[in-house]
Image: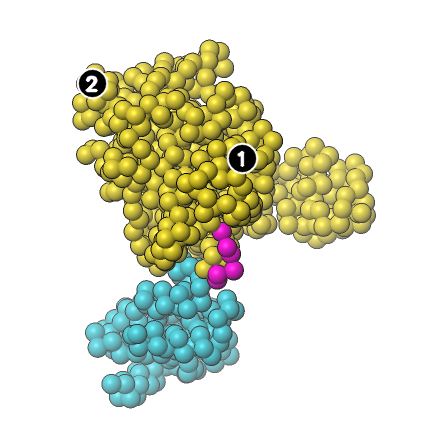
Chain colours: A yellow, B cyan
């Protein structure tokens, strides 16, 4: 233990603690910009400087460990003057058109500027000299270098959390920029569109391509029938952007808000999550049968989930040799769009060409996904617009809806009912758990052997999780699985996915089924979720997801009555002809370089 | 495999597959090809299992690791204060007039690229001209042209 004083207050902390962390424990807030709880220390923005007694220079508190007898001042005159100058230097190269910025109100630099209330520039305004061309090539992520303060959170995110390294620091000194390989457009490089960089960018240099105006336009158009679907993880995070605490479940209020905004039908991606389990679970069992009984060597195991479009694009770039391992199932978002513009449009007697499908997603990669050329099986663009949770929050505010005071609403039917198994898609391990709840019961006729159906080994925030389930007392059709240990693995965040894929490629891993979610924590930590994010916030959202599951009267996908109805009326059976046409897809090899 | 890819493969064999090998590999490519083409950076990234952006980031940091096409001989006139006071401007003007290029440009026959450099550590014998790896101190405009002509004859 180390003893030190911060602002004359003594404190004892473990060796290796930084001054920043020690100060936080005493409730002294030191401003930071490049520092982020999910990332390694960079120490390059310097706004966290503090005065250490006896030291000649000010120290960056995020990068300086405490030492015995240290006396720190976080707000001396020297610190204040330095911090103001540092902020003014950052602002001298920051295109501060805050009122027109998409991150207006969600910008850490703006917050600090509002604390310090700077007057006129005391340094030369360098913004004029900056390249003001925005990169809007990607349907998911936009990049505006004129707002970049070069803190490099995005670069560290892309490398450390995602192992993608689409962004790098190029050039040096005043020419230093955050860019892609040879300054190519984001859409042309290995970017998976996960949006984790947006979640961590302290300014408006990285932000989602937004479709707010397009969606309002569709809503106002009397000739359009606008259907909205909401992803599982949005209902446990939306509140954060509307004044509520992380982990607050706002499902009912979100439904009411969407209805008040003017959507014609408020439906649920959770419904197609249940449908995904039917299709994907059947696909897994079919693959197992072909591999184990028919000894068909062309069948690829382990099968891997395909719900996360960031993960899918990652595979297309990085592991094209494993594309056949990906489930052919479309993501729940895209299954929804394909069904909405065929089955559902017919059922409610609306022409598919007049239908607009909007999806509310915790995700920026979903914007890319809905624009993929494969996603037009209804004969139209299956999903027209994807809005992030953040965009929805903005629209709710624009509409003048007092979110906190809303009554709970219910989803419309059909394509609106869902089970607890569907909502857990929103957190890491959820798809696996939902699939196991259904697959085990199909094989044995019994519920999975876990208390309250809660498959604990696949839950939690460990990077890679493994579980084995021994299959016992199979039904006659499935007796080839009697006594088989079903080995599964779950990864979240693409850096963890890479570890898992390398294990699969090396032949060391012997899994049957793998779930991967592109973002840390799964969709609850998605690139379209409210900012900020941290391990603590993700944990609270995940707890809310599991609470939502426990609160559902039905908690197994195959028991969703609306799913049964859709099979009876339209799809006939999982992996049937219609399913293949509408609900399944294929992938393409993309360049890694 | 292209010639560049063969070269990079050989360099990686020599320097190893770790990230530490990145600098010597890039220097090896520049030694032969004078600059790092997009193709070369991609090949290096592939060989070392790095992202292409990462390789570009490193390459673009170093002045002597060019990412733009360069001539067979690279002329660098020191532009820092001592050489400036000893007449580097006259040297640059003479070379520009002789080769008919501006600083940053390459001659039509691709024999020469004219650049400036920050301090080369020859302040006591300025102005100084660096041609590829060879230093030519105490330059006058006439001497510089003479040396460049020698190089021109030696270069096909």
Q: Please name which of the two marks, 2 or 1, marks the residue nearer to the observer.
A: 1
Q: Which residue is mark 2?
A: A349
Please report the residue visible at 36 percent of the width from the left and 13 percent of the height from the top. A260
Q: Is label 2 in a helix, a strand or a loop?
A: loop
Majority SS type along the magenta span:
loop
Q: Position of residue A486 (x, y in %)?
A: 51, 46
Please report the residue visible at 46 percent of the width from the left and 38 percent of the height from the top. A475
Front-lying residue, A436 or A363: A436
Q: Chain of mark 1?
A: A
Q: Position of residue A126 (x, y in %)?
A: 42, 46
Position of the C terminus of chain A, as image quadrant, is: bottom left
One can see residue B113 in this view? no
Residue B38 as seen in the image, left or right of residue A435: left
Residue A507 shown in magenta = yes
Same chain for mark 2 and mark 1? The answer is yes
Q: Which residue is mark 1?
A: A448
Callout 1: few (<14), some (14-19), or many (20+) C-alpha neighbours within 10 Å? many
Q: CA distance from mark 2 to mark 1?
A: 41 Å
Q: Position of residue A95 (x, y in %)?
A: 41, 39
Residue A273: quadrant of the picture: top left
Residue B39: quadrant of the picture: bottom left
The range drawn in magenta is A506-511
Q: Position of residue B150 (x, y in %)?
A: 30, 88
Residue A216 as seen in the image, left or right of residue A450: left
Please report the residue visible at 23 percent of the width from the left and 28 percent of the height from the top. A342
Q: Chain of mark 2?
A: A
Residue sitting at the far front? A476
Q: Where A240 sits versus A151, above or below?
A: above
One can see residue A264 in this view? yes
Residue A292 shown in magenta = no
């Amino acid at each position: 233990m180390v003893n030190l004083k911060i602002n004359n207050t003594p404190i004892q902390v473990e060796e290796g603690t930084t001054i920043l962390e020690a100060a936080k424990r005493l409730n002294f807030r030191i401003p930071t910009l490049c520092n982020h709880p999910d990332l390694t220390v960079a120490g390059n923005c310097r706004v966290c400087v503090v005065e250490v007694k006896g030291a000649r220079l000010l120290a960056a508190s995020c990068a300086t460990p405490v030492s015995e007898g240290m006396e720190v001042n976080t707000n001396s005159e020297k610190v204040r003057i330095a911090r103001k100058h540092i902020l003014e230097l950052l602002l001298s190269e920051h295109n501060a058109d805050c009122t027109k910025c998409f991150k207006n109100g969600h910008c850490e630099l703006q917050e600090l500027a509002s604390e310090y209330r700077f007057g006129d520039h005391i340094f030369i305004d360098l913004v004029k000299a900056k390249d003001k061309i925005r990169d809007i090539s990607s349907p998911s992520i936009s990049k505006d270098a004129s707002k970049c303060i070069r803190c490099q959170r995005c670069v560290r995110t892309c490398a450390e959390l995602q192992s993608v390294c689409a962004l790098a620091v190029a050039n040096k000194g005043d020419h230093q920029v955050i860019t892609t390989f040879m300054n190519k457009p984001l859409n042309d490089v290995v970017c998976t569109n996960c949006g984790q960089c947006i979640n961590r960018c302290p300014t408006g240099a990285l932000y989602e391509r937004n479709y707010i105006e397009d969606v309002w336009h569709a809503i106002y158009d009397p000739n359009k029938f606008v259907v909205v679907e909401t992803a599982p993880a949005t209902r446990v995070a939306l509140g954060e952007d509307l004044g509520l605490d992380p982990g607050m479940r706002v499902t009912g209020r979100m439904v009411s808000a969407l209805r008040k905004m003017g959507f014609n039908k408020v439906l649920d991606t959770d419904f197609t999550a249940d449908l995904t389990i039917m299709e994907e679970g059947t696909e897994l069992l079919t693959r197992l049968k072909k591999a184990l009984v028919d000894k068909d060597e062309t069948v690829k195991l382990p099968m891997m989930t395909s719900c996360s479009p960031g993960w899918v694009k990652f595979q297309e770039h990085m592991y094209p040799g494993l594309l056949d391992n990906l489930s052919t199932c479309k993501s729940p978002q895209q299954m929804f769009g394909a069904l909405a513009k065929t089955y559902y449009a017919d059922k409610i007697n609306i022409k598919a060409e007049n239908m607009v499908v909007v999806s509310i997603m915790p995700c920026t990669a979903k914007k890319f996904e809905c624009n993929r050329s494969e996603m037009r099986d209804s004969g139209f663009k299956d999903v027209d617009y994807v809005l992030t949770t953040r965009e929805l929050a903005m629209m709710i505010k624009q509409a003048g809806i007092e979110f906190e005071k809303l009554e709970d609403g219910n989803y419309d039917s059909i394509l609106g009912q869902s089970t607890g198994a569907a909502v857990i898609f929103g957190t890491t391990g959820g798809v696996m758990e939902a699939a196991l709840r259904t697959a085990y019961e199909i094989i044995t006729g019994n519920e999975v052997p876990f208390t309250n159906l809660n498959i604990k080994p696949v839950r939690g925030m460990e990077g890679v999780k493994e579980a084995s389930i021994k299959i016992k007392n199979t039904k006659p059709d499935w007796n080839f699985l009697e006594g088989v240990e079903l080995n599964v693995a779950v990864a979240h965040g693409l850096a963890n996915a890479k570890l898992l894929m390398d294990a699969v490629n090396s032949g060391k891993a012997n899994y049957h089924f793998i779930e991967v979610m592109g973002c840390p924590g799964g969709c609850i930590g998605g690139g379209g979720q409210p900012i900020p994010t941290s391990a603590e916030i993700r944990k609270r959202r995940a707890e809310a997801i599991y609470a939502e599951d426990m609160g559902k009267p039905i908690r197994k996908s195959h028991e969703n009555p609306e799913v049964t109805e859709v099979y009876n009326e339209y799809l006939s059976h999982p992996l049937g002809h219609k399913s293949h046409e509408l609900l399944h897809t294929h992938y393409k090899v993309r360049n890694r370089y | 495999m292209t010639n560049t890819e063969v070269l990079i493969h050989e360099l990686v064999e020599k320097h190893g597959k770790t990230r530490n090998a990145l600098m010597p590999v890039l220097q090896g490519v520049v030694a032969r090809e004078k600059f790092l083409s997009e193709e070369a950076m991609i090949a290096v990234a592939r060989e070392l299992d790095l992202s292409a952006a990462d390789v570009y980031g490193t390459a673009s940091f170093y002045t002597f690791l060019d990412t733009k096409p360069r001539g067979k001989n690279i002329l660098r006139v020191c532009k820092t204060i001592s050489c400036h006071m000893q007449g580097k401007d006259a040297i640059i003007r003479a070379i520009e007039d002789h080769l008919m290029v501006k600083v940053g440009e390459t001659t039509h026959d691709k024999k020469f690229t004219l650049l400036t450099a920050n301090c080369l550590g020859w302040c006591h014998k300025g102005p100084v001209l660096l041609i590829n790896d060879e230093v030519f101190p105490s330059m006058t405009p006439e001497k510089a042209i003479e040396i460049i002509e020698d190089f021109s004859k030696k270069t096909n």
